[in-house]
Image (cartoon, grey):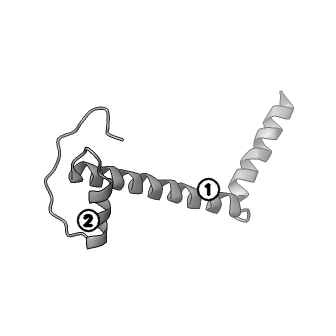
Amino acid sequence: MRPAAREPRISKSYTIDPDVESYVSSTRGDHSASERVNELLRRAIANEKYEQLGREAAQFFASDADRSGTKAFQEASLRTLSRD
């Protein structure tokens, strides 16, 4: 899951739990541990973004009481279309 165009990398130092290190080491395959960590982080970021979109969608569709502006726009559009 490597990006098509490789951007320059930034060297950072983080501490990780031993179980995370064990998981990275056992699942990295032919890639470096750094590449595996980056892959896992990209997946986690995508997952968080997907979850946030889900929360936003749920909030949008659940907020029926605050749709007065939308309903007014729809009614005005229908009036305009009925004149034509």
Q: Is residue 71 left or right of residue 52?
A: right
Q: Residue placed at 27% from the left, 32% from the top?
A: 5
Q: Pointer 2: what residue?
A: 21
Q: Say which quadrant the C terminus sits in.
A: top right
Which quadrant: the N terminus? top left
The span from disc 1 to disc 2 (Cα, nearest Å) is 36 Å
User: With 23 as the anchor, is 73 left or right in this view?
Assistant: right
Q: Which tag is nearer the camera, tag 1 or tag 2?
A: 2
What element does badge 2 sit on?
helix
Q: Quadrant of residue 26?
A: bottom left
Label 1 crowding class (10 Å Cα cut-off): few <14, some 14-19, many 20+? Answer: few
Query: Is residue 9 something one can see in this rendering?
Result: yes
Q: Residue at coordinates 24% horizontally, 36% vertically from top-left? A: 6
For this orientation, the residue located farthest to the right is: 82
- For the point 40% across and 52% down, the residue is 43
Q: Nearer the viewer, residue 77 or 83?
A: 77
Q: Which residue is mark 1?
A: 57
Relative to 32, does residue 55 appear above or below in the rendering?
Answer: below
**Is residue 17 among the parts visible in the rendering?**
no
Residue 30 as seen in the image, left or right of residue 82? left
Name the residue type under label 2: Glu
**Residue 71: image location, x then y, percent:** 75, 52
Label 1 is placed on what type of residue?
Answer: Ala
Q: Position of residue 65 (x, y in %)?
A: 73, 65
Q: Quadrant of residue 44?
A: bottom left
